[in-house]
């Protein structure tokens, strides 16, 4: 949960910024584009495009994420399989998962300051190019017969650092690209294609790994980041002028402002706490998931990929149903109900045996996929809608620091428990922890929300 993944350094700085959330700026750029689309389509008798389908720069961002998410599904499956190929123990698998998430603890908060100070698009492009380069080192080392578990740790850490900056900038860039009223539509579209990538990606990944080996398959992910960067280069919507403050205390003071904002908001604090709790324990599960599938359930790479591919249909269903769930249940109930679904689905994993692996793992992924998407689309849109533009980067960085910062701890916890208790008991304990995450939300004002509240300035 978060919810699945940077030219011109002054791009957008010269444009006037007419309102706090950039609505007038975005509309000013989009009206000529829409007028052009509508004139041509009217002349041809074609149906008019509506909403974000007529927003050319959003469509580029959407294409960028579709391609990179598809590639990332390969590494998601291939990296732990590479570690297993190198003879990794449960503890080493936990360490591998931990070092990938460790940058969210080490540089997550300063990343928010820099994202608020700089245009976001160059950061996104740099993040894509950096990950492309570092991932390409794995197939190169494999072909040279020099690949080690130590290199996997280094690659995971560096790629994770680029991901920190990319994710904070990405979540802060969308509100500058679309209007406040279009945030749910934009997040739904982005999550829908991410879900589609999760369906197709694992099956393709499993096949590539079977045919060419896991290290070579990672090269496809590296190439996907290069294509992703090319789409971002084509985005031209102006961003708000970079805020270049130099308060007493510098970066530390700006980090403090972001922390105070998140912890003082009665809606942001419980959402961050619930997501952090769920991520802590779900990371413990995933640190052992592939090893459990290989050693306890006797599954090969192709079958594991197929299970993820079929199971991830739930993510697509959740992404398309998020808006409907909110209209029927209200915003708060849809967020809480989605978290409960994810927790319950976690218990199916440790119950699986070689005879029932597919019958239990696929439903677990389907249910958790539905819950995850409904939860993420609504809580991310809520966060973006209520946060002032000047605090978007630091709000997202603070929340990511909390919710992804628990993931390396969870991975180490899972690896340690797996080494000490065995894989199945460790995953069962982690499932119980995941199921408890909704308590933060039940005890908060989130449960009373029907629709998105207005933006909230710091007190």
Image (cartoon, rainbow, N blue to C red):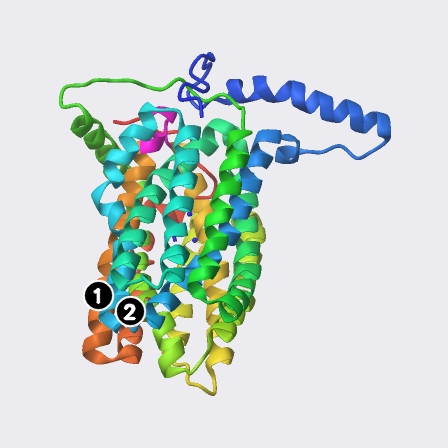
Q: Looking at the image, is mark 2 or mark 1 earlier in the sequence?
A: 1
Task: Find out whether residue 389 is within the magenta segment.
Answer: yes
The secondary element bearing badge 2 is classed as: helix
Prevailing secondary structure of the magenta residues: helix
**What label does residue 430 carry, if any?**
2
Q: Nearer the viewer, residue 145 or 386?
A: 145
Q: Nearer the viewer, residue 185 or 114?
A: 114
On the image, the x and y values in percent for residue 206 come to: 51, 68
Q: Is residue 3 visible?
A: no
**What label does residue 194 carry, if any?**
none
Question: Which stretch is magenta?
Answer: 387-393
Provide the residue designation for mark 1. 413
On the image, the x and y values in percent for residue 134 come to: 36, 47
67 versus 310 height, above or below: above
Q: Nearer the viewer, residue 286 or 20?
A: 286
Callout 2–callout 1 Cβ contact below 8 Å: yes
Q: Is residue 313 left or right of residue 348?
A: right
Q: Residue at position x 71%, y 33% from top?
A: 49
- Toward which corner of the image does residue 21 lie, by quadrant? top left
Q: Residue at position x 34%, y 38% from top?
A: 165
Q: Nearer the viewer, residue 414 or 372?
A: 414
The secondary element bearing badge 1 is classed as: helix
251 versus 333 height, above or below: above
On the image, the x and y values in percent for residue 277 come to: 28, 57
Q: Residues within 10 Å of mark 2 (few under 14, many from 20)?
A: many
Q: Residue at position x 52%, y 53% from top?
A: 70
Q: Is residue 41 left or right of residue 111?
A: right
- Toward which corner of the image does residue 345 lie, by quadrant? bottom left
């Amino acid at each position: 949960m978060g919810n699945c993944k940077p030219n011109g350094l002054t791009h957008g700085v010269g444009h006037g910024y007419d309102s706090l959330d950039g609505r007038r700026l975005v509309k000013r750029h989009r009206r000529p584009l829409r007028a052009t689309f509508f004139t041509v389509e009217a002349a041809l008798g074609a149906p008019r495009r509506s909403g974000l389908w007529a927003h050319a720069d959003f469509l580029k961002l959407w294409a960028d994420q579709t391609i990179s998410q598809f590639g990332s599904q390969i590494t998601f499956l291939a990296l732990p399989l590479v570690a297993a190929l190198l003879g990794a123990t449960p503890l080493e698998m936990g360490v591998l998962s931990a070092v990938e998430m460790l940058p969210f603890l080490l540089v997550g908060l300063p990343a928010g300051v820099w994202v608020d100070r700089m245009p976001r698009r160059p950061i996104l492009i740099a993040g894509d190019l950096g990950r492309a380069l570092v991932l390409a080192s794995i197939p190169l080392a494999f072909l040279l017969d020099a690949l080690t578990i130590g290199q996997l740790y280094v690659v995971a850490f560096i790629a994770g650092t680029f991901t920190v900056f990319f994710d904070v900038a990405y979540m802060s860039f969308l509100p500058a690209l679309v209007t406040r009223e279009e945030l749910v539509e934009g997040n739904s579209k982005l999550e829908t294609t991410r879900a589609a990538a999760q369906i197709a990606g694992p099956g393709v990944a499993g096949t590539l790994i079977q045919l060419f080996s896991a290290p070579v398959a990672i090269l496809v992910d590296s190439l996907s980041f290069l294509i992703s960067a090319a789409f971002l280069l084509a985005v031209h919507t102006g961003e708000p002028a970079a805020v270049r403050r130099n308060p007493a205390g510098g970066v530390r003071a700006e980090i403090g402002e972001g922390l105070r904002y998140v912890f003082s908001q009665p809606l942001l604090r419980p959402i961050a706490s619930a997501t952090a709790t769920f991520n802590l324990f779900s990371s413990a599960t995933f640190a052992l998931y592939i090893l459990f599938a290989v050693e306890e359930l006797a599954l090969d790479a192709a079958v594991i990929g197929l299970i993820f591919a079929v199971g991830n249909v739930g993510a697509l269903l959740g992404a398309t149903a998020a808006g409907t769930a909110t209209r029927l249940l209200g915003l708060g109930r849809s967020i809480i109900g989605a978290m409960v679904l994810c927790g319950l689905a976690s218990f199916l994993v440790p119950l699986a045996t070689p005879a029932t692996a597919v019958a239990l793992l696929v439903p677990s992924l389907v249910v958790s996929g539905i819950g995850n998407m409904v939860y993420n689309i609504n809580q991310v849109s809520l966060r973006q809608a209520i946060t002032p533009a000047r605090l978007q980067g630091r709000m997202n960085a603070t929340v990511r620091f909390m919710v992804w910062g628990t993931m390396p701890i969870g991975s180490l916890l899972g690896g340690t428990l797996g080494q000490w208790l065995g894989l199945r008991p460790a995953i069962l304990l982690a499932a119980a922890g995941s199921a408890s995450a909704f308590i933060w939300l039940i005890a908060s004002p989130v449960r009373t929300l029907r629709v998105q509240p207005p933006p909230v300035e710091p007190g």
